[in-house]
Amino acid sequence: MLVSGIISIVLGIILTLAGNARNQDPFAFVQYGPNPGGGLITFGVLFIIAGIVILALRFWKKHRNPND
């Protein structure tokens, strides 16, 4: 689970950076609505959130009962 969480976060960062590069302006979505990089940014953020959830579940399972 640790590796899948880290891979998910790294993939999310890459997708977000790729979306920003296509826009040339990270705040263009707010000003202009849908744009060429908007989908990549959205998927990047979703992958980052999924990675954080995976890592949180892994650490919660590992430390929920210290006697195990």
Image: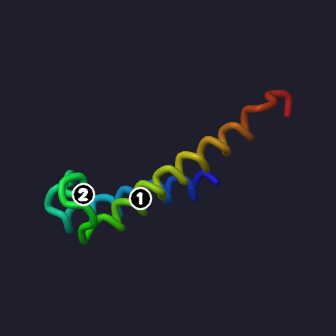
Indicate which label's residue lies in the foreground, 2 or 1.
2
Mark 1 highlights which residue? 12
Residue 27 visible in the snapshot: yes
Q: Residues within 10 Å of mark 2 (few under 14, many from 20)?
A: some
Q: Residue at x 20, y 51 (%)?
A: 27
Mark 2 highlights which residue? 29
Residue lying furthest right = 68
Q: Is residue 66 above or below residue 57?
A: above
Expressed as whole percent of the image width and height from the top left, the position of residue 43 reads 42, 63
Expressed as whole percent of the image width and height from the top left, the position of residue 37 reads 27, 67
Q: Determine the secondary structure under disc 1.
A: helix
- 35 relative position to 60: left or right: left
**Disc 2 to disc 1: CB gap under 8 Å:** no
Mark 2 or mark 1: whose residue is earlier in sequence: 1
Q: Residue at x 35, y 66 (%)?
A: 40
Q: Residue at x 50, y 50 (%)?
A: 49
Q: Residue at x 50, y 53 (%)?
A: 6
Q: Quadrant of residue 31?
A: bottom left
Residue 14 visible in the snapshot: no
Expressed as whole percent of the image width and height from the top left, the position of residue 42 reads 39, 60
